[in-house]
């Protein structure tokens, strides 16, 4: 019986956690920009841009992608550049620096089932890592697709959007799932639509939520995820934004660092993701 339950849970995890496998997101393959990992991309809308980053003909598109990254980098969003060309790491790093590229760029980063050796093509993957929203060469179209995908992730309105997100997050991102359920319960109209459209799913998510509210580790994780989001979304020109300091962020990191020692792999990865966002934010502050 125990083996049957474990096998069932594995099938559920495999179905929900994403059919796509990343490769070449390793330190030795990194050419420039922020360092990321496959685990860090969980729960984020991802643009995978495959092109020769040393070809001058591609520079305008690369600059547009940098603008897109600069616009949405505080959201659950990442651009990943996949260099499909020649050139030493030193030369490529110099080119990326000259272009002002700060999003992560790796040599031949690959997403199995999506890019598979594609060149001069850009893909948009939804925040569950299971749905390809776009695959083509028009970077301006990419911008529109990304905007809609981020909005659907942060402000789901239809029952099917809630289902897709909560099915994924309750397995892979428990802290985010707690915040998502809290948001759903506060939105009466959405809650009623979800109750009508997928009552069994709502019962399952509600059971997760009730259990999570009694789990101190998950509650701490949710607070960490929420704190990291507030730090990322801060308006540096506002009074509240100006109160965010490097020392304050470091204090937050220290407070939640122990979550990386959890026995729950999902908690460990989500905590690492949120802590990485806080460390990255602290690096951008002067004090």
Image (tube, helix red, strand yellow):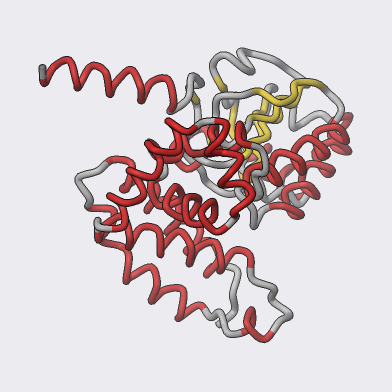
Residue 26 seen in the figure:
no
The location of residue 9, given as percent across then percent down, is 27, 23
- Which residue, as the protein is rendered here, is positioned at the far left? 1
Please indicate whether residue 108 sits to the left or right of residue 19 in the image: right
**155 or 97: nearer the viewer:** 155
**111 or 82: nearer the viewer:** 111
The location of residue 73, given as percent across then percent down, is 67, 53
Count of number-bearing discs: 0
**109 or 227: nearer the viewer:** 227
Q: Residue at x 64, y 71 (%)?
A: 234
The location of residue 165, given as percent across then percent down, is 53, 37
Q: Residue at x 56, y 47 (%)?
A: 191
Q: Residue at x 85, y 37 (%)?
A: 59
**34 or 167: nearer the viewer:** 167
On-image quarter of the N terminus: top left
Above or below — where is 263 with respect to 4? below
The location of residue 97, given as percent across then percent down, is 71, 50
Q: Residue at x 38, y 76 (%)?
A: 251
Above or below — where is 46 with respect to 108? below
Please indicate whether residue 282 sits to the left or right of residue 251 in the image: right
Above or below — where is 22 with respect to 3? below
On-image quarter of the C terminus: bottom right
Residue 174 seen in the figure:
yes
């Amino acid at each position: 019986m125990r083996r049957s339950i474990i096998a069932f849970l594995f099938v559920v995890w495999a179905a929900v956690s994403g059919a796509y496998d990343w490769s070449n997101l390793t330190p030795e393959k990194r050419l420039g920009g922020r360092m990321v990992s496959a685990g860090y991309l969980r729960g984020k809308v991802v643009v995978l841009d495959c092109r020769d980053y040393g070809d001058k003909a591609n520079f305008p598109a690369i600059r547009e992608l940098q603008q897109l990254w600069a616009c949405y980098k505080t959201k659950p969003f990442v651009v990943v550049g996949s260099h499909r060309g020649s050139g030493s790491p030193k030369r490529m790093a110099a080119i990326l620096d000259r272009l002002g590229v700060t999003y992560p760029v790796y040599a031949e980063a690959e997403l199995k089932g999506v890019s598979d050796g594609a060149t001069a093509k850009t893909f948009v993957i939804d925040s569950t890592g299971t749905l390809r929203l776009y695959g083509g060469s028009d970077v301006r179209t990419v911008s529109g697709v990304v905007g809609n995908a981020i909005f659907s992730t942060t402000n789901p309105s239809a029952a099917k959007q809630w289902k897709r997100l909560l099915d994924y997050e309750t397995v892979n991102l428990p802290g985010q799932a707690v915040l998502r359920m809290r948001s759903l319960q506060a939105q009466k109209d959405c809650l009623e639509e979800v109750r009508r459209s997928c009552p069994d799913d709502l019962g399952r998510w509600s059971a997760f939520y009730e259990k999570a509210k009694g789990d101190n580790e998950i509650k701490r994780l949710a607070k960490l995820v929420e704190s990291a989001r507030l730090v990322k979304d801060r308006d540096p020109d506002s009074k509240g934004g100006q109160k965010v300091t490097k020392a304050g962020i470091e204090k937050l990191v220290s407070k939640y660092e122990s979550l990386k020692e959890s026995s729950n792999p999902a908690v460990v990865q989500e905590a690492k993701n949120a802590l990485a966002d806080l460390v990255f934010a602290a690096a951008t502050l002067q004090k």
